[in-house]
Amino acid sequence: MFVRRPAPDPLEPALVKALSTVSTSTLGHLRDYGFPRGLAPLRRPAAFVGVAVTVRIPHLDSTAVHVAADGLRPGDVLVVDQSGDSRSCFGGVLAHTAAARGAAGAVLAGSVNDVEEIVETGLPVFSAGVSARTTRILGVEGSINITVTIGGTVVNPGDVIFADSDGIAVFDRSEAWDIANLLKEKEAAEPDARVRISQGEHLSDLTGAAKLFAAGLSTDAVR
Ligand SMILES: O=C([O-])CC(=O)C(=O)O
Ligand SMILES: [Mg+2]
């Protein structure tokens, strides 16, 4: 059986712009969930912000991926859950299709093939690796725009996919402005910390690590 739910609304351009100026790892300093694990960009630098268009397929059948790729719109991120399989469902022609439709990127729980062709399209792609073992068009089953799981992280259609060379963060769009503003504020303090460290101040004083370390230091450990 095939399922196709409505495509999510696009993200506000101003939100995409705001998130494009901050880093995923700054969010990683603040929270520990919403980061798909085990996926890497095909090449670095890699950075994109877009809205999740999700697809779930059974291990061998990528019929729904081809249909979803045709429906991509500018700013969409194609997110494919392969039900745990690691083969490739995404190669050069799919990357070309996604890029031609203006997609912001693709995130694949499985692998990719046609690496050079994908790189040539300029589409930023995260995957679990590269594999010559691929899916086929079998017409068995698949779903578009349903809740999926990628790298241990739940992704709903319409979620924000915020990716850069450090990784991918996924969150609900209702939190997106708060996250963008918080990361901007946190990153704004970093240049000042660098200057103060160059001038001799201690990193651990600036971060509070020195105080916490001293407070928890075992007297036995002092030599
Ligand atoms: O056709 C596929 O499913 C994968 C592929 O090789 C391509 O996109 O070029
Ligand atoms: Mg191919």
Image: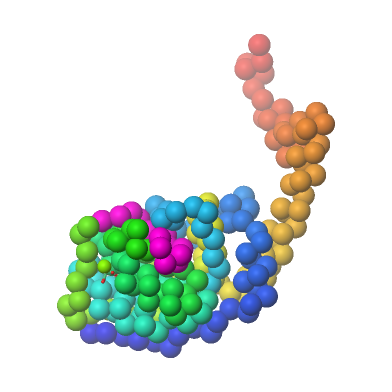
Q: Quadrant of the C terminus?
A: top right
- Pick the residue in front: 194 or 176: 194
| Colouring scheme, one of rainbow, by chain, secondary structure, one colour | rainbow
- Pick the residue in front: 122 or 35: 122
Residue 127 inside the magenta-drawn segment: yes
* Image quadrant in which you'd find residue 120: bottom left
From the viewer's perspective, tell me whether residue 174 is left or right of residue 200: left
- Residue range highlighted in magenta: 119-131
Residue 101 inside the magenta-drawn segment: no
Q: Quadrant of the N terminus?
A: bottom left
Does residue 188 lie above or below 180 as drawn?
above
Residue drawn at the location 46% of the way across and 65% of the way down: 122
From the viewer's perspective, tell me whether residue 73 is left or right of residue 173: left
* Image quadrant in which you'd find residue 176: bottom right
Q: Is residue 156 visible?
A: no
Which quadrant of the render holds ligand 2?
Answer: bottom left
Q: What is the x, y in percent for residue 60? A: 20, 69
Does residue 90 lie above or below 37 as drawn?
below
Q: What is the x, y in percent for residue 156? A: 46, 74
Does residue 221 lie above or below 3 as drawn?
above
Q: Pick out the residue farthest to the top.
A: 223
Q: What is the x, y in percent for residue 145? A: 40, 80
Residue drawn at the location 45% of the way across and 66% of the way down: 123
Counting every numbered tag in the picture gives 0
Q: Is residue 187 visible?
A: yes
Residue drawn at the location 40% of the way across and 60% of the way down: 119
Does residue 182 lie above or below 206 as drawn?
below
Residue drawn at the location 58% of the way across and 78% of the way down: 11
Q: What is the x, y in percent for residue 34? A: 51, 61
